[in-house]
Amino acid sequence: MSRLIIVSNRLPFSMEENEDKSFALRQNVGGLATAIGPYHKTHRDSIWVGWSGIDASEHTKSEVESIKKEFSDRRCVPIFLDESEVKGYYAGFSNDTLWPLLHDFPHEANFNEETFNIYADVNEKFADMVAPLIHKGDTVWIQDYHLMLLPQMLRERFPKASIGWFLHVPFPSPEIFRSLPWSREILNGILGADLVGFHTVDYANSFKASVKLLLGKDVDEQGHVELEDGRRSTVDAFPIGIDYNLYRRTSRSNLATEMRRGIEAVCGKRTGQRYATSLTAESNAATEASTKEGAWWSHYSREDLPELTLARFAASGSPKPKKVIVSIDRLDYTKGIPERLRAFELMLGKYPEWIGHVTYYLLATPSRENVPTYKRLKEQVDQLVGQINGKYSLLSWNPIHYITRSLPIKPVCGIYAAGDVALVTPLRDGMNLVAKEYLACHDGRAGALVLSDMCGAARELDQAFIVNPYDTSAVCEALHDALEISNEDSRRRNIAMQARLKFRTAATWCTGFLASLAQVASTSLADKRLRMDQRNTMMEQWDKAGSRLLLLDYDGTLTPLVRTPDRARPTQGLRSLIRRVASDPAVTLYIVSGRSHETMGAWFGDLPVGLIAEHGVWRSGYDSKADSGTGRKWTRLEGLPDAAEWKKRIEPIMRESVDSLEKSFIEQKDDAMAWHYRLSDQRKANVERMRLLEKLRAITGKLGLMVMENAKVVEVCPVAVSKGQAVAPILESGDYDFMLAAGDDSTDETMFAVMPENSWSIKVGAGITRAQSRLLNAASVQRLLGYLAAESEATRA
């Protein structure tokens, strides 16, 4: 049985030593562990290899074995690195060289040959640990910039292995990347993977440009890089999501709710009159102090004293409501924390009516505290927070609550939920999941997002207030607009973005990447693969279209092929997905199948879809105004041969094949007859198939019939019947702005043949096709439909 081997710098668990000297694992909460952890947990055929965070030299052999056992119980394989390896590989080359370079901070990068050599040695150490685990048919999925040399190291040992690599941070322009002395070694290391993944098309294009500039290799429009060893690597984008339901659910937990209410109370959103009275008292005291009679310190009293101005703005008579701004980040120079603090300071100065009414909760988790650059950054942030609080604080209000420690997920979700505005303005970021987490914690609630255009999330969250994080004035104005926005408008914006996030989750990212890896690793499936840039174009066309048509085969396209036809009954999940897509008033959806109309009616008759059965013999349109109690109305194609007569000739021939081949059987339809051999011995089945085809073709033409070969099925039906002929009137009758057809076998090729040039056609699975694009399997089609449904819901919001 094939397995998935996940390889990353750190494992999803950290080891803790108990008082009794035993060891226990604690779930990590980092982005990678959160994204892939659920997939690893639910897929028992997966193994995770990574650094344990432990120096084995500090433990006895028995303790090391005990640690390995704890990890093994969670299907994890720990790697042990000593202090010098951690310093050179992790703190050195990974974080002192690659991190700043990949984030467009080349002036912060240190180029040290010693740390690169240690980095290479540790990558080799990972290869030595992974190699014994790889069996024939296994898939290896390598994560992030810590292991850029590992794909090629494994490729040299396993030329036929299926290997993927994904980068969780940005990839810079070739002009920046070429400054790395070992850039060519890094690129060749990455290209050892069959599939190279990035968060956005822009990052993928930067990588392709570096491959062209530094290695002199062309990358074709399919993203293929042809390599010297005869193989090729494919480059594409796969935007990562979050576990949306986890954050939505956690934001409603008791602890998160208590955190949210506590913040609201401190900021005056819950204590109401008592808090307003304290501000009013301060304002009144300032007003009295400004008069000669009331100012015992009158020789200091001037109208331009900042205390007087601030207090008056904060008076209870101000029309501004109490609001909370939140941001949660690691204290890193890529996050743009000083820049956003300056924008907040500018906003208070430019719009003083918000003084006393808006509170900024800044959670900045310390990072690499011993590194001089990070020390300077913390000093800078500390100074800015103190400067702003010193300048604008009142006795009853501080503009910034500054928290410099790590918090668990529940209180973090409470902070998210308390935020009327999230200020997410990194200077450079691969995706930035904070923005997505904030929106998940505001599911069904108002809340505004100010988002940097320098992170991948800005491509998806286009209803946010998008800003250039370096433009302090623009961030100031966006922040003010976000504070001023009505709850109705912010809720409308959020619903649009949340519709996408609910589907584009970490789980769909995992399955989407792995499906693409399986596709590019197979020579019969790799051509015409539907790329991310194509999918983005498809979504743009879908959004703009006023009338959309979907023509979808069923078996093998909407649902996987099964051993017997009756087992292909649609699941509730699939029916729900079809209903979501087809319920959009702008969508006309037809399921075009070879199944009988009785079966199609029983399975899909209550859904808002048109149905075409037996490859076009039977048709049932959908009329939303029709009386639901009358049931489906079916129309039979006219002028067909008498099925009762021709079946007398065909059935005996098929019956001979049933008798000759064990576990084969005949499926009867009104105007078709099919011989199925999926359950049979395939070697014997192919011999019998050829014999049957020869006999059938000798007589079907004279009877006005034709023979079709589908997935392990030989079917006989009238010549006048085909899916192409069946859908042609639909294509001609409607003025559609968007058209898409999807199918998996030869019967669907006639449908692809009649699709207009400006439409989309998708072949599912292997085989020669005239379709424009190809997807791996039915699960991939369902993911695509999910994207379309989410876009419809986002557009209608």
Image: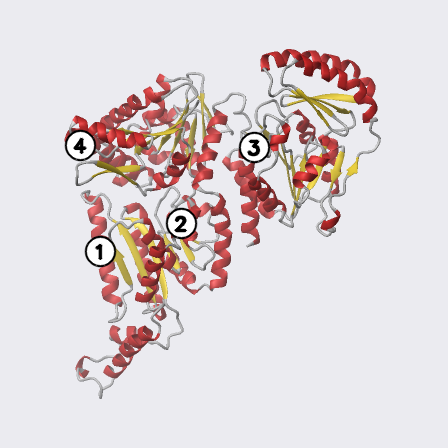
Q: At 25% from the left edge and 55% from the top edge, which residue is drawn?
A: 403
Along the polypeptide, which appears first: circle 2 or circle 4?
4
Asked if the residue under mark 2 is in contact with the one under mark 1, i.e. CB atoms within 8 Å, the reply is no
Query: Dot 4, crowdedness within 10 Å: few (<14), some or many (≥20)?
Result: few
Task: Say which of marks 1 and 4 sits in front.
Answer: 4
Amino acid type assigned to the residue bearing label 3 in the image: Ala
Residue 386 in the image, given as x and y percentages of width and height: 22, 60
Query: Is 177 in front, or is 159?
Result: 159
Tell me the residue that label 2 is attached to.
Answer: 247
Q: Earlier in the sequence, mark 3 or mark 2?
A: 2
Q: Earlier in the sequence, mark 3 or mark 1?
A: 1
**Amino acid type, mark 4:** Glu
For residue 588, say whether it is visible.
Answer: yes
Estimate how packed mark 3 is, as few (under 14), some (14 to 19) or many (20 or more) residues with alpha carbons within 10 Å: many
Say which of 606 and 160 sits in front.
Answer: 606
- In this image, 472 relative to 461: left or right? left
Whole-number angstrom distance, CA of label 3 to CA of label 1 = 53 Å
**Kind of residue at badge 2:** Tyr
Q: Which residue is mark 4?
A: 83
Element class at badge 2: helix
Task: Determine the CA span between mark 1 and mark 4.
Answer: 31 Å
Of mark 4 and mark 3, the one earlier in the sequence is: 4
The residue pinned by badge 3 equals 778
Gap in Å between the C-alphas at discs 1 and 2?
30 Å
Is the Cβ of the residue at disc 4 closer than 8 Å to that at disc 3? no
N-terminal of the pair, mark 1 or mark 2, is 2
**Numbered mark located on residue 382 in the image:** 1
Residue 433: where, in percent of width, then height? 39, 46
- Left of 503 or right of it: where is 355? left
